Image: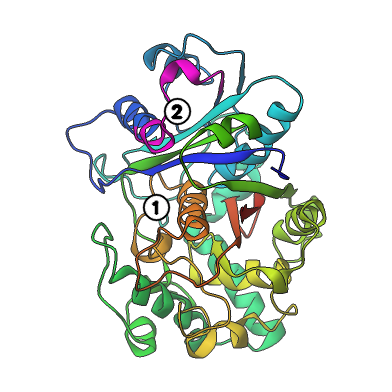
Amino acid sequence: MKNPAYIVGAFEHPTRKAEDKSTAQLHAEVAFGALQDAGLSSSDIDGYFCAGDAPGMGGLSMIDYMGLTKLRHYDTTESGGSSYVIHVGHAVEAIMQGKCNVALITLAGRPRAEGMQTGTAVRSAGVGVPDESFELPYGRTIATMHAMVATRHMHEFGTTSEQLAWVKVAASHHAQHNKHAMLPKVVTVEDVVNSPMVADPLHRLDCCVISDGGGALIVARPEIAKSLNRPKVGVKGWGEAYKHQNAGGIDLTYSAAAMSGPMAFEKAGVKPSDIKYASIYDSFTISVVVQIEDLGFCAKGEGGKFVADGNLISGTGKLPFNTDGGGLCNNHPSNRGGMTKVIEAVRQARGEAHPAVQVPDSSLVLANGKGGNLGTRHGCGTVILERE
């Protein structure tokens, strides 16, 4: 077993609107699902990882609620939607340091049931947050921050709305095979660019869905992974990085994946051209284009051309991505998409994706998560997984 730790359990909650479940219950249900997938029990868990979506004080309430009585280590690193990709790397490091043997990572939330207006509402993070007084008066929203990035990318590199639309088209081609996908209908480039404008130049179909649900992962040390009757998916490389405003000296054309990606590739000892499948955080179509460039799948500024003409569609394109439909078509639980990116990467590595979208020889896959606002401050996590 040549990798330092293995993902032995993965589970995605099937619900997309949880009107009859609490957030805590959703966390418990995805944890149970991942344990069943791995063939383990809660008494085997001695490490727990969660982020700001977990109700309670830094996860302490969830530890009690789920009855994790054997816990020796827990981690509440919070970086928005990228947290769970970063948690995978942290779990590997904790296992390597002897802090735990079997780590559970959970995500869950119910913004759809709660009627949360996510991407287009001006929201404050609270009194005392240092950036609020400088940005909130200008009507900062998640959609407008990403639209700023798209506008700059178009200005710098000639990227077009039609090229961005191809990201949504690819996601929809995959979502049609996912019975749980919120938007399973295949769309065209014309459908995307003719949909209502949300934040110029981003249209409604350039934006991800809002959904409830969640997911969980279990990371274990090699000896335990070997004892389980499950495919061996090793964590071969991992990296995390953060990007901030830099006192106004900010280049909107790149993301923190430009730092987290090279870290993961260096650890794994592989290069972008070795990757057979990629899960890329897709809160907006522009997010995918920028991350694909930053991860080295194409040169900076060439992302629009790279994603065009079906190049992200499984069975057709050079880089199959988000074969579950991703955040653009399948789900975006708790407005945090990193967890489901890792889950679909695990499915691909195991050969358990839907047959219509399963990538042949997908023994080496990548998942990249982004959390925060692409146009302001955010964090990225990258993991490279290998099927042994």
Above or below residue 66? Residue 124 is below
User: How many neighbours does mark 2 have within 10 angstroms: few (below 14), some (14-19), or many (20 or more)?
Assistant: many
Residue at the image position 48 percent from the left and 55 percent from the top: 350
Depth check, front residue: 345 or 311: 345
Residue 186 vs residue 375: left or right?
A: left
Residue 381 vs residue 335: left or right?
A: right
Name the residue tied to disc 2: 54
Mark 2 residue type: Ala
Residue at the image position 66 percent from the left and 76 percent from the top: 152
Q: Quadrant of residue 272?
A: bottom right
Mark 1 residue type: His
Residue 215 vs residue 142: left or right?
A: left
Which element carries disc 2, helix, strand or loop? loop
Residue 102 in percent (x, y) is at 57, 26
Name the residue tied to disc 1: 332
Q: Is residue 37 magenta?
A: yes
Kindly report the secondary structure that dominates the magenta region of the rendered protein: helix
Which element carries disc 1, helix, strand or loop? loop
Residue 227 in percent (x, y) is at 54, 32
Q: Is residue 148 magenta?
A: no
